[in-house]
Amino acid sequence: MSSPKSALPPSLPAGDAPRPGGAKRHLLRVLGWTVAVIAAGCVAFVAYAAIYPERMPLAIGAIVEDFTGANPQPIVLHVPPSQPLSAVALLGKQIFNDPSLSASGKQSCASCHSPDHAYGPPNDLSVQLGGPHMTDAGYRPPPSLAYLYRQAPFSIGPDQNDMDAAPVTLDQLATAASGTQRAAKTAGVAPAAPALVPQGGLFWDGRASTLQDQAIGPMLNPVEMANKSTDEVVHKLLNAKYLDQFKQLFGDRIMQQPDLLVDEAMFAVGRYEFEDPSFHRFTSKYDYWLQGKARLTQAELHGLRLFNDPDKANCAGCHLSKPTADHLPPLFTDTQYEALGVPRNRDLPVNKDPKFYDMGVCGPFRTDAASLTQYCGMFLTPTLRNVATRHAFFHNGVYHDLKQVMDFYNLRNTSPEKIYPLDAAGKPQKYDDLPEKYHANIDVADAPFDRKLGDKPAMNDDEVKDIIAFMNTLTDGYKP
Ligand code: HEC
Ligand code: HEC
């Protein structure tokens, strides 16, 4: 006789009647299904979030960002409109690319500010060669000319609006600013006190205020295009192949007005740099990410967060990374001047003289702020857009790759012996590119420079790599 047990459906436990365990199993099964349904819902939700991260509520934005690398709050960036160049800018383009305007006949603006290198230097030299025979070394690396379209004129102190009201000297401005506390540079936080430090202007020391003012500088600089006088520039312009364009734009009389001819030529170069979209492309991966059209890798995303973290790298304290309130894209500079105390570049010919110091705002290349010694050692915070395409970093070109730059930020205070040369007694010669009496100007307040000797560095090796990965997203020409 077969056992009654065998007649029971196999899924039920053996026995005469369903035991209490049966109810439990049933419950488990229901629970199982519920979990499955929720899980399916989650998968669908995550998939939806991955496709439309911008539709997610803010609270889960960070989770979505982690998961997908997409920006949970994309915005529309206000970039300069792309319009055909004006006739003046077209003339400026020819001047910019014309080597016949240099003493050597071999150098144009584009030689040092190469369009193929984000208008920065085309090689890895610390400084470029120029002069009548292309054998004279410059003093500083050429900055990128990209993204200067929003650069304000040079000024000092909190009350920039007074600049137009009455002509004031830099001394007056500095005196007015002297009561103000230097604003702390904390990533993501608006400074509580108005900045005391100088801001705006062109060149590493801010000595030119507008692109037009600036352009005559390299034409006359003995180690650059090396014309001996403005007359020489005039002579070359009068022989330029685009002279007819000058006449069409400014009338034949321009030929008899040499000062005006030079002024208009420099104005044209300035217009070209301002108008041509190639100077402000905004086509980096980060720009697309800001607009929700590209995703960052985990390393890039982590790098961005460290870059913005006020206690860690704090890079965004000075290299602003967020769009402005009116949706202008970030330029990765606050356009202010800081003394970071980068090591002396002993390879620069100008530094062969041990008494020579390039002190930025207070001279010697700039002369109008020589008495303002509180600004000795300060240089303009450069944009980090396209920084990964450069091969010479800081105002003296002392570093040649981004890892070296990161080590400087990370180890300057904690292990100065790894950054500066050692003296005879084996002690690191900290801040060896600035006379000792000005060492107090150097920033020791803002992270990562707030660490002390022997402290743990602000960033570990992986974090350094991730920040570099993020800086690589700032290179124009990304295809989303
Ligand atoms: C021999 C290389 C060389 C040539 C040629 C040259 N420059 Fe420069 N340029 C530099 C250097 C070096 C600097 C930084 C100088 C300084 O800070 O004192 C610079 C700075 C600039 C700046 C300021 C950028 C900033 O971020 O502040 C502008 C604008 C500029 N150059 C435009 C031009 C124009 C226009 C021409 C042609 C008329 C030109 N340059 C020719 C090397 C060169
Ligand atoms: C307190 C302001 C400040 C902070 C914070 C700061 N920087 Fe800078 N940065 C500057 C200034 C000023 C310079 C130019 C200094 C010089 O040449 O003497 C500079 C230069 C650079 C350069 C060289 C660019 C070039 O074209 O030569 C790089 C790269 C750079 N910073 C990256 C970073 C990174 C990454 C961080 C965060 C770890 C950071 N910065 C934090 C102010 C700052």
Image: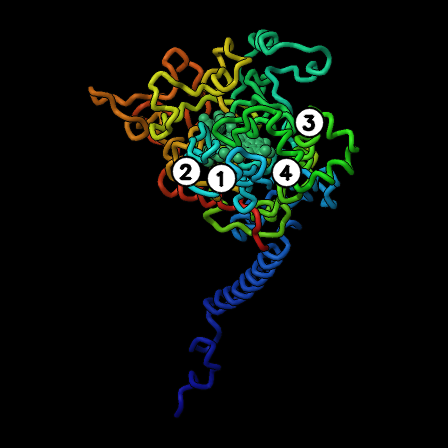
Residue type, numbered disc 2: Leu
Residue type, numbered disc 4: Ile
Residue 5 location (% of width, % of height): 42, 83
Whichever of labels 2 and 3 marks the residue nearer the N terminus, that label is 2
Residue 143 location (% of width, % of height): 52, 34
Residue 236 seen in this snapshot:
yes
Whether the residues at callouts 2 and 4 have beta carbons within 8 Å, the answer is no
Mark 3 or 1: the one toward you: 3
Residue 131 location (% of width, % of height): 47, 31
Residue 237 location (% of width, % of height): 65, 34
Residue toward you, 328 or 421: 421
Whether the residues at callouts 3 and 4 have beta carbons within 8 Å, the answer is no
Whether the residues at callouts 2 and 1 have beta carbons within 8 Å, the answer is yes
Q: Residue at x 54, y 37 (%)?
A: 144
Label 1 and label 4: CA atoms lie apart by 18 Å
Residue 125 - label: 2
Residue 217's place in the image compared with 23, above or below, is: above
Whichever of labels 1 and 4 marks the residue nearer the N terminus, that label is 4
Label 3 and label 1: CA atoms lie apart by 26 Å
Residue 311's place in the image compared with 62, above or below, is: above
Where does label 1 land, which residue?
Answer: 121
Q: Residue at x 37, y 21 (%)?
A: 433
Asked whether mark 3 and ligand 1 are closer than 8 Å, the reply comes as no
Residue toward you, 304 or 397: 397
Residue 309 seen in this snapshot:
no
Residue type, numbered disc 1: Pro
Whichever of labels 3 and 1 marks the residue nearer the N terminus, that label is 1
